[in-house]
């Protein structure tokens, strides 16, 4: 995060000084100088907070001095140090138009190396008009509505890692899930009877706002994720083939869509997975077709509840917008794709079936259409060029992390050596997971494992942290998917 403290000072060298704060260490503030000469900008940490205030107080003269002698100054104020800010966006304006018209995002990263942490080309004829973002505070009160088959497990991993790191409290289900497919009830949250309000909530549920509010803080930020309904239907068909009664006696999605009403009986076991699944998960009535006016009312109400609705189909863009909405560092939304099907488990969808699926899931289609539009409005407000630049940066970091942590790409469960990283398998569909690179140090193994730990294992880990006295009784330590990464020392956990 950065707060602009002072503007340009000289014609030859344009400089900005701004404060940075570090989401990982809010107490550490420092002062960063962004110096642009010609088309090249460099950013560096120049001093700590109190020096920054002095610099700002004395204004342009000192600033220019620093800009010219920044190497020397850097040495004087303590030499190379770890950069506190994680990213700074520079908004560029067209000189002739005067106002900012182009947006460019650059990344300000420290590696504990020398002072040079950012280099960015500024196109000819443009000038810096603003340094972004404005001051913001990382959100720690969050409710993620995890819809089914929409990349929710990957988002969940982001939240688990974040909450784990900051020791935040999670609203966890008393049993396996929050009573799904029934509408959510606050009494299904473990510890609700203590009157505790939780920081994070993110497990599958059928959404009911009034009940969720009972266990969450009043300033909770709500978000969810949707996916193209044809993709959701295809994923749900293979995953819930034996769970949904509508799918059980049909060989393929094509055959199902030839005559869905022959197989589908509303309300029959598991059939929430077979039609308008996202609509259902949002707590809406799948048996009643709303009028246009009712539909608009529903959308307005959802718009008011959810601060952002992500799209699995634009996952990286979603992560960037999310991290800005939450005021989190970019590194916190770096992910590996979790819970994906193997190629062998995927069947091609014919054009004809895709059209039928859209009609069959018309409520999901209406939802997706509405939130796809609002997503891109959100993206446009953020700035498409800025978004694109940050998406590239996110992908680059993902690549570096993968090269560091992973042994190859995602593989079938049976090929995963360490049982703790095997994802839950349902029916005959193959769900992929990862092997970690051999030879990682203990710290690196722990760090890397957080990114690939499947949902159930991570939930158990958090459960152990949050309810140490209950954990041993609840968790089957020898279970292939249930054992946590580090078993608590014998004798510490009480039944
Ligand atoms: N990062 C990213 N980008 C795009 N798509 C992704 C991503 N992560 C997961 N996925 C896909 O999401 C599907 C699994 O969704 P969920 O994790 O929500 O499933 S579940 O309801 O929790 O079982 C599953 O889809 P299918 O492979 O089509 O089944 C995953 O491949």
Image (cartoon, rainbow, N blue to C red):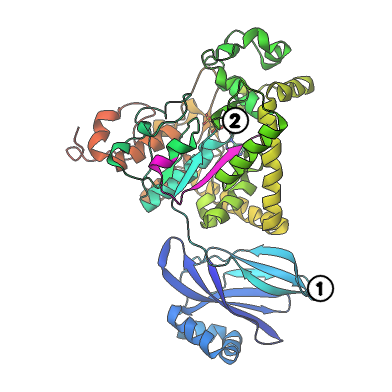
Q: Please say whether residue 447 is visible from this viewpoint.
A: no
Image quarter of the C terminus: top left
Residue farthest along the front direction in this orientation? 293
Q: Is residue 75 above or below residue 286?
A: below
Decide whether residue 194 is among the magenta residues.
no
Looking at the rendering, the quadrant in which ligand 1 lies is top right
Left or right position of 239 against 469:
right
Q: Range of the magenta residues?
A: 213-228
> Which comes before the other along the chain, label 1 or label 2?
1
- In the image, residue 285 lies at what x, y percent? 58, 25
Left or right position of 111 against 293:
left
- In the image, residue 173 lies at what x, y percent? 38, 32
Q: Residue at x 63, y 9 (%)?
A: 263
Residue indicated by mark 1: 97
- SS at mark 1? loop
Left or right position of 408 against 175:
right
Residue indicated by mark 2: 278
Q: Is residue 53 above or below residue 112?
A: below
Q: CA distance from mark 1 to mark 2?
A: 45 Å
Q: Please say whether residue 147 is visible from this viewpoint.
A: yes
Q: Is mark 1 within 8 Å of ligand 1?
A: no
Residue farthest along the left direction in this orientation? 491
Q: Nearer the viewer, residue 295 or 318?
A: 295
Decide whether residue 217 is among the magenta residues.
yes
């Amino acid at each position: 995060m950065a707060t602009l403290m002072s503007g340009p000072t000289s014609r030859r060298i344009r400089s900005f000084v701004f404060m940075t704060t570090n989401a990982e260490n809010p107490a550490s503030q420092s002062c960063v100088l962004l110096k642009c000469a010609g088309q090249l900008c460099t950013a560096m940490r120049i001093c700590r907070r109190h020096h920054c205030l002095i610099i700002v107080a004395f204004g342009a003269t000192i600033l220019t001095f620093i800009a010219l002698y920044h190497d020397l100054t850097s040495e004087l104020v303590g030499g190379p140090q770890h950069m506190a800010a994680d990213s700074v966006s520079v908004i560029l304006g067209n000189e002739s138009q005067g106002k900012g018209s182009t947006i460019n995002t650059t990344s300000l990263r420290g590696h504990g190396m020398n002072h040079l942490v950012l280099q960015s080309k500024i196109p000819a004829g443009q000038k810096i008009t603003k340094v972004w973002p404005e001051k913001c505070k990382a959100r720690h009160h969050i409710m993620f509505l995890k819809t089914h088959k929409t990349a929710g497990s990957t988002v969940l991993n982001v939240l688990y890692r974040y909450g784990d790191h900051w020791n935040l409290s999670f609203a966890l289900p008393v049993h396996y899930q929050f009573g799904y497919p029934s509408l959510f009830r606050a009494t299904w949250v473990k510890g609700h009877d203590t009157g505790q309000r939780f920081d994070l909530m993110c497990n599958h549920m059928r959404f009911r706002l009034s009940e969720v509010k009972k266990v969450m803080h009043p300033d909770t930020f709500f978000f969810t994720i949707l996916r193209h309904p044809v993709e959701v239907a295809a994923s749900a068909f293979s995953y819930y083939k034996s769970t949904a009664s509508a799918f059980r006696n049909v060989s393929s999605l094509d055959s199902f869509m030839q005559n869905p009403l022959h197989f589908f009986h509303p309300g029959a076991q598991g059939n929430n997975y077979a039609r308008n699944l996202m609509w259902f998960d949002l707590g809406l009535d799948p048996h009643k077709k709303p009028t246009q006016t009712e539909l608009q009312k529903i959308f307005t109400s959802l718009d008011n509840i959810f601060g952002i609705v992500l799209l699995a189909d634009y996952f990286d863009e979603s992560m960037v917008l999310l991290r800005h909405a939450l005021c989190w560092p970019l590194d916190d939304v770096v992910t590996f794709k979790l819970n994906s099907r193997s190629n062998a488990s995927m069947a091609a969808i014919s054009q004809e079936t895709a059209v039928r699926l859209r009609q069959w899931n018309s409520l999901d289609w209406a939802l997706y259409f509405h939130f796809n539009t609002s997503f891109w409005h959100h993206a446009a407000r953020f700035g498409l060029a800025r978004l694109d630049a940050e998406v590239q940066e996110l992908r680059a970091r993902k690549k570096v992390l993968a090269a560091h942590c992973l042994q190859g790409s995602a593989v079938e469960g049976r090929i995963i050596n360490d049982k703790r990283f095997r994802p839950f398998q349902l029916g005959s569909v193959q769900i992929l997971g990862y092997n970690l690179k051999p030879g990682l140090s203990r710290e690196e193994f722990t760090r890397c494992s957080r990114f690939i730990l499947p949902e159930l294992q991570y939930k158990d880990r958090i459960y152990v942290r949050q309810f140490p006295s209950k954990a041993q009784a609840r968790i089957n330590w020898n279970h292939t998917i249930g054992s946590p990464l580090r078993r608590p020392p014998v004798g510490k956990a009480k039944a």
